[in-house]
Amino acid sequence: MTTVAAYAAPAAKAPLERTTIERREVREHDVLIDIKFAGICHSDIHQVQEGWGEAIFPMVPGHEIAGVVSEVGPGVTKFAVGDRVGVGCMVDSCRECENCKAGREQYCTGGNVMTYNGIGKDGEPTYGGYSEKVVVDENFVLGIPEGISLDEAAPLLCAGITTYSPLRRWNAGPGKKVAVVGLGGLGHMAVKLAHALGAEVTVLSQSLRKKDDGLKLGADHYYATSDPATFEELAGSFDLIVSTVSAPLDLGAYLGLLKTEGTLANVGAPEEPVSLNLFALLGGGKSLSGSMIGGIAETQEMLDFCAEHGIGAEIELIAASEVNEAYERVQASDVRYRFVIDTATI
């Protein structure tokens, strides 16, 4: 075991504090990663606060991890010492179910092992990226291509793949009209990616406060959802709407913005249930869907796509000691657009 410094929440809703954790010795197929940067995802906050259900404490959050390989196990074939790598939301899966065999490990029917707030196959709790080092099986490590700086790459491991996956699944591209609900950590990546894929992109945000940013990121249009006229003007406009917000929406109103047989894909996860009059789906043969991160192969595809198109996250680099303040600012929507911890400061 190796002892490393980390930032952890000792209990639900408690502030994060500096501590030490144990990392396992490098096994046959393991990679030891010196973490350089760790993104702060809104889901870190949901889990520290037990907003999504009972959690495991102490908790070291962080599933947007970018770093450099410092040691490999004797059986490792995919990575070498010195490689630039990333780790996303999961660090293992059953590898045997239909979904795992199809490269959809995020939907593992046996239950995948989450990067933190999970239990590994060895029965030990998993600890995330707000730490100096992590040991991960090579099959759940991603290569970060040259051309993306590690700090801007870190958020791609969750925010990037979470938005890339539905855009690819529903064929966002030339001739398609895509709307992105919310311009935050996920939303700003959805705009960049949809634009790079060739779609016509519209941002639907509560206000026009970030309009200039949205247009710079690649949006063609920007509307305020607080204005009822928006829903009249844009009725029947979109092939795909990707909702990135973690607050409950009036789903019927947004379904009204879809073309016939259009899709509303949810990647934001509100803590409360939402209601829907099914006539909003029936009239127009529309689809209401969800999407969760992506498989390992698709995540690598996304990283390669980002490198090819010069895409990284818009980040605000912080010291580890600022993490509690950063959580408050995320909840107040006061970040443009992803906090990233410089783990040298832990």
Image: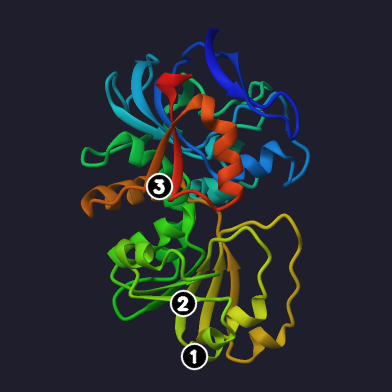
Give SS at disc 1. helix
Disc 3 versus disc 1: nearer the observer: 1
Q: In the rendering, at what x and y percent does residue 159 appear?
A: 46, 50
| Residue 288 in sight in this render | yes
Tell me which residue sits at (48%, 46%) in the image: 158
Nearer-the-camera pick, 345 or 144: 345
Tell me which amino acid carries mark 1.
Glu
Name the residue carrying label 3.
299
Q: Distance between the residues labelled 1 and 2?
A: 10 Å
Task: Give the mark nearest the N terminus, 1 or 2.
Answer: 2
Disc 2 versus disc 3: nearer the observer: 2
Q: Do the residues labelled 1 and 2 touch (CB within 8 Å)?
A: yes
Q: In this view, does 334 lie above or below 146?
A: below
Q: Is residue 257 left or right of residue 168?
A: right
Name the residue carrying label 1.
233
Tell me which amino acid carries mark 3.
Thr
How are the residues colored?
A: rainbow
Tell me which amino acid carries mark 2.
Tyr
Tell me which residue sits at (46%, 14%) in the image: 26
Q: How far apart are marks 2 and 3 (CA)?
A: 30 Å
